């Protein structure tokens, strides 16, 4: 039986929420009754499934309002209709797909960009009104202007707001669009309305500008840091156009950031549509029910934003290669980086739902400037094909005292660098399986019951630790094979309030491999606890020490 499908329209404009799309499936040319059937539209773009959308079946057609596709971005999609009836599922059409295209509307982005404060934004509108008056714009019958009115609004999207105010409003969380509306009423009773919209940006944000310069024959592009006061910048072009930036926001793809709506599809669409560019995740709490995947170079900037797992998933976000065996590109295309950066107030919240906070499977990635918390296994996990990752200025934390499987950083491969990282209350701070560098990393535990039996660093590869501070773990360093471990200028400390009757006697260096380890300890201060027996190591040989200070520490317990 041949399943065929026709459609009443193949195109609509983004932000159009009231157009019905009608689908007409047939079996061998005969219409079918969909009144009691379960009907869904399956949507795919560039080989990535975008989701299924429930349709209403009535007689021989299935209807879907464009509002249901709000989370999809501009572009052409492959679609097919899934019809379930009598316990069986049929897919229309049998061969190939239908195409559905979402087009730009008149409010879409322009290329020319300037920056201004909110006050300048308001001033430009006043100047425009003066310009209107000076030009004496006419009504349709030649009459003059009777009055002009200006009003303001903020909104979550570039769709025209419904509620307007007389005064300028600062953008609020989840509503970064600043609108202005000028209504000109003519003496003949007719009127004309002009709109302008701007996007807000935090102080210090990179904004890519494009400006025309006749002296250099064409368009030139340059970068500038927003530096206006109060942490707010509005960027755009002149009033008659639309204010906007080449930096897209996930809100433009249907994300809400309200802590309630599932934003997974919208954010994934935003990522897929902005490879090779910068994508902004503005302030808000974004609910994530499926793992976000980044498979191509992109820079993602989080501004006081939280990505919070709401369902059991492997990871909140995965920086992954396009192909599972894609490693060699690292050496020849190291510039093809993925960057995930926060503003120190942003958070990846695994929420006790995701196994991993950030999964690193793509070499030459960079992550920095945010916190990661409450992963079931590891806050950061770097796979065995990952090289040249740079992770820095991060805060990792576990708040579940029952999770003794919690790990701050797990690294399977080599040549990666971790710097300026705090790891708080993870039962194991670091698991290092390759040849990697750690500098200014501070694993520490403050719960006395949780600290018992916890390990600061587990090393089964060549680990280089410089100026690291291991605080209140039963075992500061555990060496599991004969690969070298270097501790340079490190420090240990035992919070004596965390050691009570029944606690395991702590060790600075615990060796669990057979044979002699290769451990170099150069400089640093190693503090034990006066309330229990703290030993430097459980082996007699294989540890070389130079220029260290020891307090409340015995020598070695013997092999």
Image (spheres, helix red, strand yellow):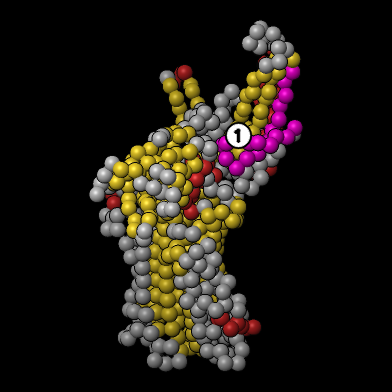
Magenta run includes residue 42:
no
Q: Tell me the residue at 67%/25% (across/down).
A: 182
Q: Position of residue 20 (x, y in %)?
A: 48, 38
Number of labels in the image equals: 1
Q: Tell me the residue at 40%/60% (across/down).
A: 360
Callout 1: helix, strand or loop? loop
User: Is 531 situated left or right of 222 in this image?
Assistant: right
The correct choice, above or below, for 67 with respect to 347 in the image is above
Whether residue 442 is visible here, answered yes or no, is: no
Magenta run includes residue 158:
yes
Depth check: 240 or 219 in front?
240
The C terminus lies in quadrant: bottom left
> Where, by quadrant of the figure, is residue 432 drawn?
bottom left
Q: Position of residue 30 (x, y in %)?
A: 30, 43
Q: Tell me the residue at 74%/15% (across/down).
A: 146
Depth check: 495 or 425 in front?
425
Depth check: 209 or 553 in front?
209
The correct choice, above or below, for 344 with respect to 43 in the image is below
Whether residue 29 is visible here, answered yes or no, is: yes
Residue highlighted by disc 1:
160
Depth check: 303 or 77 in front?
77
Image: magenta residue range: 147-166
């Amino acid at each position: 039986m041949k399943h065929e499908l026709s459609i009443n329209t193949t195109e609509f404009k983004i932000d159009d929420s009231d157009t019905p799309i009608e689908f007409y499936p047939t079996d061998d040319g005969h219409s079918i009754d969909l009144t009691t059937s379960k009907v869904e539209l399956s949507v795919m773009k560039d080989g990535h499934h975008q989701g299924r959308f429930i349709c209403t079946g009535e007689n021989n057609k299935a209807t879907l309002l464009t509002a249901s596709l709000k989370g999809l971005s501009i572009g052409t999609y492959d679609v097919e209709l899934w019809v379930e009836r009598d316990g069986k599922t049929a897919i229309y059409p049998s061969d190939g797909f239908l195409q559905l295209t979402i087009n730009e509307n008149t409010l879409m982005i322009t290329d020319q960009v300037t920056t201004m404060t909110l006050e300048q934004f308001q001033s430009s509108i006043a100047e425009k009104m003066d310009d209107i008056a000076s030009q004496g714009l006419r009504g349709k019958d030649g009459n003059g202007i009777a009055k002009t009115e200006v009003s303001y609004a903020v909104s979550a999207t570039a769709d025209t707001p419904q509620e307007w105010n007389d005064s300028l409003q600062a953008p609020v969380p989840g509503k970064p669009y600043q609108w202005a509306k000028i209504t000109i009423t003519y003496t003949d009773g007719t009127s004309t309305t002009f709109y302008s919209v701007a996007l807000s940006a935090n102080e210090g944000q990179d904004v890519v500008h494009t400006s025309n310069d006749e002296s250099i024959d064409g368009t030139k592009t340059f970068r500038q840091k927003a530096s206006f006061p109060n942490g707010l910048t509005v960027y755009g072009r002149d009033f008659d156009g639309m204010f906007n930036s080449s930096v897209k926001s996930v809100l433009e793809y249907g994300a809400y950031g309200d802590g309630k709506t599932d934003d997974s599809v919208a954010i994934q669409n935003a990522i897929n549509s902005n490879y090779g560019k910068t994508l902004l995740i503005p302030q808000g709490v974004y609910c994530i029910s499926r793992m976000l995947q980044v498979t191509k170079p992109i820079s993602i900037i989080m501004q006081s934003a939280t990505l919070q797992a709401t369902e059991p998933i492997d990871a909140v976000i995965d920086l992954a290669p396009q192909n599972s065996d894609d490693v060699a590109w690292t050496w020849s295309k190291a510039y093809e980086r993925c960057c995930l950066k926060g503003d120190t107030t942003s958070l990846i919240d695994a929420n006790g739902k995701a196994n991993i906070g950030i999964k690193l499977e793509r070499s030459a990635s960079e992550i920095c400037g945010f916190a990661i918390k409450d992963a079931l296994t590891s806050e950061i996990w770097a796979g065995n094909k990952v090289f040249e990752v740079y992770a820095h200025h991060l805060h990792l934390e576990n708040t579940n005292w029952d999770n003794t499987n919690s790990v701050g950083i797990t690294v399977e491969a080599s040549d990666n660098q971790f710097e300026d990282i705090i790891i708080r209350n993870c039962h194991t701070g670091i698991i290092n399986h390759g040849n990697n560098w750690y500098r200014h990393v501070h694993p520490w535990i403050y719960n006395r019951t949780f600290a018992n039996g916890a390990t600061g660093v587990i090393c089964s590869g060549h680990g280089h630790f410089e100026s690291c501070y291991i605080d209140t773990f039963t075992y500061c360093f555990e060496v599991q094979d004969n690969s070298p471990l270097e501790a340079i200028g490190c420090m240990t400390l035992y919070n004596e309030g965390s050691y009570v009757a029944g606690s395991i006697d702590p060790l600075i260096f615990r060796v669990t491999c057979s044979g002699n380890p290769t451990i170099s300890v150069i400089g640093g201060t190693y503090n034990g606890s006066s309330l229990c027996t703290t030993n430097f190591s459980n082996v007699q040989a294989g540890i070389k020490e130079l220029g260290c200070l020891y307090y409340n520490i015995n020598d070695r317990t013997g092999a």
